[in-house]
Image (tube, grey):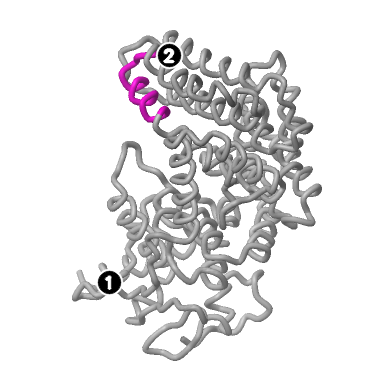
Amino acid sequence: MPFTVRALSQKLLSLRDRAKRPDDPAKANAPDSDALGHPRVHIPMRDIPPDASEQSRLWLQGRFLARQENWEALARGLREADQDRAGTIGGTPVARLLAEGACSDALDTAIVAVSRNDAIAARAALFALSDDLADGGGDPWLAGMLARAHVAVARGWTAASGASASTPQRSDARAQHLETAARLLAGFDPIEYDSPALAELRCALLELGPRPRSRVADDYEDLIDLSPACPDHMRALGRDLMPDRFGSWTLIDREARRTAGRLSDVWGAGAYVWVWFDVLASGEARAFAQVDPELFAEGLHDILHRRPDQHMANLLAAYCGLTLSGAAEPGSAQARICDCFGWIVQDHLREIHPGLWAAARPIPGKADEAETLRRGSSRAVSTLAEHFAHQLRLGRQVHFNDAGVTLSPDSCTLAPCGSLAYPRADQRNEDRRCLT
């Protein structure tokens, strides 16, 4: 019996080396702790990374100005942030965060009303905010702020589930909020005002137009060219080009290549990644059949070359190692992209931002902040343990620090070792067997 178990274990290890990480890394047979429960993957955890801290500060600033009814200062802050293309470390537009914070009280009330299927109360909450802004109604950025709130409530009606209201009632309530947003923005041309925020809202309202499929590429091109450094706009383009929206799989790839060509001075091939980012995350097999995995991998390199910060390293590591993980045929596009997890970890990852790992594969339902961070930390460590499973089974520990990744008790550093850092033969310049 022991021989049979040992042989089976060796067979399973062989299969693991050829297969992708399992859907739930926490269930992977990777020893991320020793027999006494001590961790064997050592990596700093930053529960509140710089990007999250900056987002929170800006959101609170917007809420403070709204509660003080200092609409003039708020309008000025929105305009300056928008026209300066100000963004957080992770690329979130500052103007969006200020607007969301400023509308948060009214929006919270409206979303509660949505949960009760009370369309009248949901509209009343935002109309009350509109009344407070009566004196500043002619300002395009304040109008955009209100329009953004209506779009958010419309999406709330879309997401409502298990509600007793009929689908037509929810659809009607959603349409009313979108139409109100469109009226608020009428007369404010994004190009004339040099405003990515207004252009973003115009794209959010595409479905109200008579021919959204004929406009989607042009409207997003305007938005992306107004703010090429913001990944969110390219990700939104990909989502709106999916077949259940306004595009097709072929059109996604075409627009991803066009966008990458226009923005090569900003992102290299990285824009190709951003357009496909959320599309591939949907798990659609047809998306993987259409994407160019080699161009995608090149784009990942270019993104991290231009944005070599830990926010980006965590975002892309969680994406390749968790979001896209699962059974994949060897040599498939999915397998090729997931394989990038190895060099992202080796060359770039130095600390864990749990919030990004928790968001990489969201779980339905609400969780408090502490539970979200715990889940993200666990996912990150489990995914890393699965990646380094061979070394951990040999009794070694993996240490991450600013200098790189090391193994102990052996003194070998992974970076000089091609067989460890780049296990695929086509990713290194030598085929020497790693002796560690």
What's the amino acid at mark 1? Ser
Mark linked to residue 170 = 2
Image: magenta residue range: 106-119
| 233 lies above or below 16 | above
Residue drawn where x is 57% and y is 46% of the image: 94
| 425 lies above or below 15 | below
Q: Is residue 305 visible?
A: yes
Dot 1 or dot 2, earlier in sequence: 1
Residue labelled with disc 1: 33
Q: Do residues under tags 1 and 2 come within 8 Å of each other at their CB atoms?
A: no
Residue drawn where x is 69% and y is 48% of the image: 84
Please name whichever residue, 252 or 180, is drawn nearer the observer in this view of the structure.
180
Q: Residue 412 in the image: state x and y as whole percent.
A: 48, 88
Q: Residue 408 in the image: state x and y as whole percent.
A: 38, 86
Please name whichever residue, 71 or 357, is drawn nearer the observer in this view of the structure.
71
Q: Is residue 112 magenta?
A: yes
Quadrant in the picture for residue 308: bottom right
Circle 2 Cα neighbour tier, 10 Å, few/some/many (<14 / 14–19 / ≥20): many
SS label for mark 2: helix
Q: Is residue 416 magenta?
A: no
Q: Residue 191 in the image: state x and y as whole percent.
A: 77, 33
Majority secondary structure of magenta residues:
helix
Q: Is residue 327 visible?
A: no
Residue drawn where x is 69% and y is 61% of the image: 302
